[in-house]
Each structure stands twice: as C-alpha cells, then as structure tokens.
Amino acid sequence: MTYALIDNSTLTAVQRISGQVQTKSKDSVDTDIVALENLVQAILFYDHTIAVDDYIPKYRNERIAAFPNIKFLNTEEFNLNEIEEQAGLKANELQPKIQGGQFVNEDFKNLLELLQTHMTCTWDIISSVYHLTLKSLSDDSDDFKKYGNIAAAIFSELNDATETGNRTFGDVELVDRYGRPIEKGYAVPGAKWGDGSGESSGEASGAIKAFVASLVWLANRTIFYSQTARYLQADTFLYPIRQAYQQNYITKTCNYGFDYPKSIVEHFSTSLNEDLVSIQKAGLATATALNVPMFSAWLAKETGDPSEIIDAAYRIREETEFTEARDQLREVRRLFDESEIGEANKSVTKIINDLNKSSNDMRVKYGIKTRQGVPVTKLVQVYNTCAALSSLPILPGYNFKIKIPEFFYNFNQPRGFNAVYRNLTHDLSTVWTLGEARDILGSKVVKEKDAIVYNPKQESTRYMHAHSKYKSPM
C-alpha cells in the first residue's frame, strides 16, 4: 500500500478555495490552488490519504467531517507527541539573522533561493523616523506578483500557529552592511532625511518580526510532518511552502549538499523526456517524475464549482488509468524498499517508462487547452534509503497496545522515506496561465474582513544600495 500524508495547512487551503474558510489575503489564492492540486494528485495516485488529528480543537469535528475519505490519526495513540517535541526543539535552534538586508542563516537563505525569491530590508521613513522594512527585490511585475504570492503563503504560517494555540517568536539578529549590530538608538549611515542624523528605532518592523516568526513555525511544522511521514512510512504532500523547506531540511540533514534539491527541482522543471534520475551520495537516494496535467483545472471546468473538485477527484480515481498507475507506483515503492537502489533502478526504469505513456494519455484526456498549450505539472518523488536517513533524529517506538489501522502493512519494518518535490515558482506560473479554469478555482474565495495583512513593497535592484530622502540601505 502507498500512503500520502496531508498536512492540515493543505486542508485549510483547500477549504479556502471551496469557500468554507475565509482567507486573510487574496495573494494566497494561487498558492492555495497549487495545494489543491497536491491533494488531488495524492487522491489519484495513492492508495490512502492520511492526516494527523491535531487541528484546532473547537473545529476538529468539522475538519474530519469535511474530509470523510481521509484517515485522521490520533497523536497520542501513535506517539506523535514525541516527534512534535523534537520538531519544536529543532526549530528553536535556527537563530534567524539578517545582515545588510539579507537572511544569512543557512536555512532561510537556502529556502528563499530555492523559491527563486529575493527579499531585502531597507530603512524607510515612517513618521519622520527610520524603520527597517521588508521588501521584494524585483524589477518586473511578474517577479513582484510571485513574491506577493509566496510572502502571503509564508505569513499564513503565523496564522496557523495562532489558531492552533501555539506561540512562535520573531526574534531576529540585525546587523548592518558594515557588520555592526543594530540596536536601539542606532543611527543609519549616510541617511539623507532631515538633518541626516538617520535616527531610527533600531528595531525590525512588525512585518519583519511576523515574517521571521512565520518562517520559524514553517520550519517547526515541516520537520514534524517529515519525521511523522518517515515514522508512518508515508509520502509527504505538504503545503507548497513547506514542501520547499522540506527539500532543504532533508538535504541538509542527510548531507547531500545544497545543490541537491535545487538540481532536482530545476531538472524536473525543464526536462520533458527523462523520467528517472539517480541521485548522488553513493546511491542513497533516487528520484522519479511524471508529467501530468493540472487535474484540478480540468475538474474545475467539469464541475464549474471548486467545492465539488475533491468529490469529483475521488470519482475519477476509479478510472482504469489511475488504478493502473497506483498499481505501478506501488510496485516502484516495493522495489525501492526491498532492493538496492542500483538494482531497483533497472526495474523501476521500465515501470516509469510505462507510466510515462499513461501520463501522455492523461494529458490528452484530462488536460485543458490554454494559449500556452496544455498546462503540465510534475509529480516528483524522491526516495531516500534507510542509510540516507541514519543522521535524522531517532524516532519513537510504536505503540502496539493499540490496534494498528488495517490499511498499514509491515508497520514495524524499517523502510526508506519518500518526499514529493515541487517547483513552486513553476507551478505558480502554470496557475497564472489557466484562464477560465483559474477564474473558477478562485470564484468561491472569501476574504476575511479587517484581516491584518502584510503586503511587501517593491525595491528595484538598481536602487538597492542607493540612498534617498525617504530610504536608505540596511
């Protein structure tokens, strides 16, 4: 059996698209559509979808009722509380630092690079006082739109933490471009406002603190779900921002090198031919990918109602092409679990080639026509062997006092860990080309009144180091 572990952030995004939950920012809609596509692919290509039963207590029953086909697992019964504690400790070690306008701590710096997003901090005049402000470093509208989407998705993490009763902090070390710490009473070098003294509060703005707090919670949840998936022998389908951070987390922890997730994402974004790639580090990991249509777009046009897409996905999953695909993907997983990577690759290559023929048929049957052609996305799975995971934290033992769900098999047998990789920038660009389908997918989104939203400003790369009467570089 194959299992897709869905995080509650993804389920909330799906409910925002269906209009069941209000959104704080319309900038999050496109990323939520990518999350919806994630869930649809999990439904179509996996035997079971599972989730952790740790949603907001007062809305817990409503959440479970909203997704009757997902199996929700109790945290206490499965010893997941111990994994949650590990995730919290790891996230608290991150020590965010911004120097000269850029994140310099490895985790967040790598995340932003993987997202192909550039941010900066500048001193801006607000009420005659300099305040450190978060901005998008971009020169065209598409880059700025992309950053707005990604920033909104990151800021939503803070809302997730608040609603679940968790506290996350926006403490961040601030250092200017000359290496001097920024503290209360700090004077901005080269300031041109007023008499040029450059008086400032010496503190980050509320947006920067919220952004940092969101990143810390994002790390916490990503680590938790990554470890939980490894524990439950499931594949992770996380909210797109978390998927991006997960790639960095696994790479760093398993010592693959930073270029590992970047090369995977870039390769599968550009290659339309190769569907299997062996990945470095003595055969500790391998990756497979399928080119598939945006099923959520096709389902949107078929139903005309985004709230009906999930039910429709469960109906079409019984079509022959999907039952055969699940059989083949199940065999791929079995081969990786039971054979050496090199040996498994030989057998897996033939299966993936057969799957690729099926995916071509799917693009014809379930693809929609746009001016740019048929929108295509990738189902990219990276399998990490048990040896690759040896440096990850030790998992808690199974609680065999309870009855293990019937859908699990060989629960106590050590296996590798599979993670789904996405190129969020590519997927957002695909969403923007959907035309009528995009209009349907966003038609039921309801914005929360009086919601506090942090909207990034834009900073041109040509002026990032320049002073003016209204702004100075950090």
Image: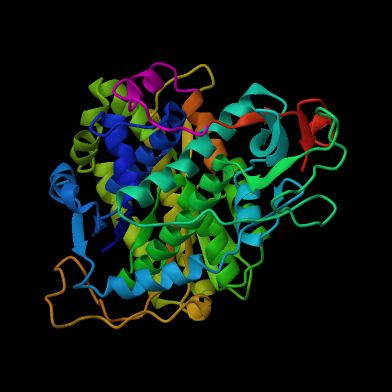
The reply, left or right, for residue 95 in relation to residue 91 is right
The reply, left or right, for residue 414 in relation to residue 249 is left
At 78% from the left and 50% from the top, the residue drawn is 176
The reply, left or right, for residue 40 in relation to residue 381 is left
Which residue is at the front of the view, 36 or 245?
Answer: 245
Give the overall secondary structure of the magenta segment: loop
Q: Residue 418, position in %: x, y?
A: 42, 63
Residue, far right: 190
Q: Residue 415, position in %: x, y?
A: 38, 76
Residue 331 location, quadrant: bottom left
At 17% from the left and 82% from the top, the residue drawn is 400
User: Is 453 colored magenta in this rendering?
Assistant: yes
Residue 194 seen from this side: yes
Which residue is at the front of the view, 263 or 462?
Answer: 462
Quadrant the C terminus occupies: top right
Magenta residues, start to end: 433-454
Q: Residue 26, position in %: x, y?
A: 42, 26
